[in-house]
Image (spheres, grey):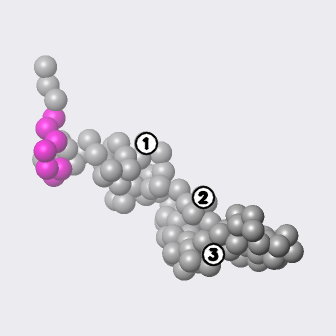
Amino acid sequence: MAKKSMVNREVKRAKLVKQHAAKRASLKAVIADQSKPMEERFKATLKLAEMPRNSSAVRMHNRCQLTGRPHAYYRKLKLSRIMLRDLASFGQIPGMVKSSW
């Protein structure tokens, strides 16, 4: 089980990313538009830099939904390898069968 503070930090980051997504996208569009004057693009760059760092989606880290483990994460199932194995062994994941030979 991961530390609760780390899991809460990721929840806070996800909330900030969702809250500032539209504004960040509009500023990035202004910055990327070559037809705009250089001064306007520079002002947009400064506004983007003033926004909270944790509002950037790049700073988010994938974590297991059940344990909060950050490593060995399966994106499709949103689980770590350990929980995936446990749930598959108990038949909790549809279509997944324990292998034996």
User: Which x, y percent locates residue 25?
Assistant: 60, 71
**Earlier sequence position, callout 1 versus callout 2:** 2
State the mark number for residue 17.
none
The correct choice, above or below, for 35 with respect to 40 in the image is above
User: What residue sits right under mark 3 in the picture?
Assistant: 26
User: What residue sits right under mark 2 in the picture?
Assistant: 58
What stretch of residues is rendered in magenta? Answer: 92-98
- State the CA–CA distance, disc 1 to disc 2: 19 Å
Between 13 and 39, the residue placed more toward the observer is: 39
* Label 3 crowd bin: few (<14), some (14–19), many (20+), radius 10 Å: few
- Callout 1 amino acid: Ala
**Earlier sequence position, callout 2 versus callout 3:** 3
Q: Nearer the viewer, mark 1 or mark 3?
A: 3
Secondary structure under badge 3? helix
Between 69 and 57, the residue placed more toward the observer is: 57
Is label 1 in contact with label 2 (beta carbons under 8 Å)? no
Secondary structure under badge 1? loop
The outermost residue toward the front is: 35
**Total numbered badges shown on the rendered structure:** 3
The answer to which quarter of the image holds residue 48 is bottom right
4 displayed left or right of 43: left
Q: Which quadrant holds the N terminus?
A: bottom left
User: Which x, y percent locates residue 92?
Assistant: 16, 52
Secondary structure under badge 2? helix
Dominant secondary-structure state across the stretch colored magenta: loop
Between 63 and 40, the residue placed more toward the observer is: 40
User: What residue sits right under mark 1 in the picture?
Assistant: 72
